[in-house]
Image: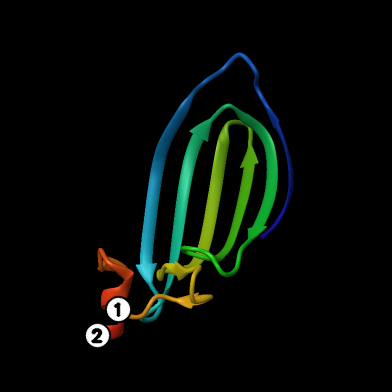
Amino acid sequence: MFNIGFGIAWPWSHRWDNLSNMDCSLSENKALEINVYRNSILLEARLEISHAEDHAGATVWLGLLGFNLEIRFYDKRHWNYDANRWYLPGEEFLDDPAESDSL
C-alpha cells in the first residue's frame, strides 16, 4: 500500500457528518464512490493506493475548512491471501476451504 498526505485538524472539535454520498459500478469488478463530509479537518490532502487486498484501489481525500471530499476508485472483489489472487465467484462464502476443490 502507498499512502501519502498531510492534514491539520481542529483539536477541540469532534464533529463528523456525512453530507452526501454517491457510488456506482463502472464494470463487473470496478466501482466509483464519492463522499462529502463535514468534520474538524481544517486542511487535508491525501492519496492512498492499495493492491492485493480487499477492495483495492485508489482514494483521494481533499479537505478545507471543515469540509472533506473523498473520491475512491476500487475493485469490488475480495483478496484470497492463501492463493495470492482474487476470490473466484462463490468461493469466498464457503465455510470450509477444502470445499472449494469441489467447485
Task: Give the residue number, with chain letter if any, for mark 2.
Answer: 102
Q: Does 27 appear above or below 2?
A: below
Could you say where residue 93 lies in the image, as x and y percent from the top left?
26, 67
The secondary structure type at the circle numbered 2 is helix
Quick one: 58 or 83, which is closer to the camera?
83
Q: Does the CB distance between marks 2 and 1 fall below 8 Å?
A: yes
User: Gap in Å between the C-alphas at discs 2 and 1?
Assistant: 5 Å
User: Callout 1, which amino acid?
Assistant: Ser
The residue located at (33%, 70%) in the rendering is 97
Task: Give the residue number, with chain letter if any, for mark 1.
Answer: 100
The residue located at (30%, 78%) in the rendering is 100
User: Callout 2, which amino acid?
Assistant: Ser
46 lies left or right of 72: right
29 lies left or right of 84: left
Quick one: 51 or 33, which is closer to the camera?
51
Could you say where residue 91 lies in the image, as x and y percent from the top left?
30, 75
The residue located at (46%, 56%) in the rendering is 34
